[in-house]
Amino acid sequence: MQQSESGNPSAEAIMKIKDTTSNPAPLGLLGFGMTTVLLNFHNAGFFDMGTMILSMGIFYGGIAQIIAGIQEWKKNNTFGAVAFTSYGLFWLSLVGILVMPQIGWGAANEASAMVAYLCMWGIFTGVMFIGTLKLNRALQFVFGSLTILFFLLALGDATGNAVITKIAGFEGIICGLSAIYTGLAQVLNEVYGRVMLPIGPVKK
């Protein structure tokens, strides 16, 4: 066994690398929140589906969230990596569902298929909501309201009731705004080094 100059056995050197990268969560939250608000303006009946929503779904709701998810993975944040990557791919898949039939890449879905799609995402989000119970109040609201949104949209498609879809639209606007608030709060709180916009205590 090697001895150090002091006579003690030499210990294995452990190098700790300081993480100097920025917080990717605000990008993911804003990409999700802003796209969700705009889509649900459509669901609430304010304007028709168009390229504005589709473009937001591809680039900000989709690609930006995937980038945020990859950055969360690099920070060893499993929850953030799974959430942002999954919802980024949700937006890309939703655009695919809307656009692919228009360009001849398959037939349009039956209502029952969309119900299954939305319910699956609702179940996923509900389980992720349980994870937020160890996080802050703002994220709990985002994931809780998103779970409700998915099941309301599924119910609207299952029943064909436009009123339910419209109610889902207003609920989705609230959900999206809560994500925008949470993302901007993290930005401002970090910039000012104090709580400018509260997001609630972190559970231990």
Image (cartoon, rainbow, N blue to C red):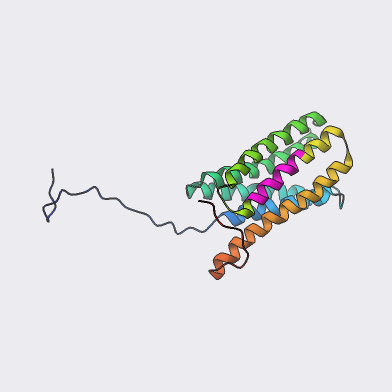
Q: Quadrant of the N terminus?
A: top left
Residue 184 percent across, percent down from the top left: 64, 61
The front one of 163 and 62 is 163
Residue 185 percent across, percent down from the top left: 62, 62
Residue found farthest to the bottom: 192
Q: Residue at x 66, y 47 (%)?
A: 143
Q: Residue at x 29, y 50 (%)?
A: 14
Residue 74 percent across, percent down from the top left: 48, 48
**What is the magenta range?**
140-151
Q: Magenta span: helix, strand or loop, mainly?
A: helix
Q: Does residue 173 appear to the left or right of 159 in the view shown? A: left
Does residue 146 appear in this view? Answer: yes
Does residue 60 appear in this view? Answer: no
The front one of 196 and 113 is 196
Residue 188 percent across, percent down from the top left: 60, 66
Q: Residue at x 60, y 58 (%)?
A: 200
Figure quadrant of residue 187 = bottom right
Figure quadrant of residue 194 = bottom right
Q: Residue at x 48, y 58 (%)?
A: 21
Q: Does residue 28 appear to the left or right of 73 in the view shown? A: right
State how many labels appear: 0
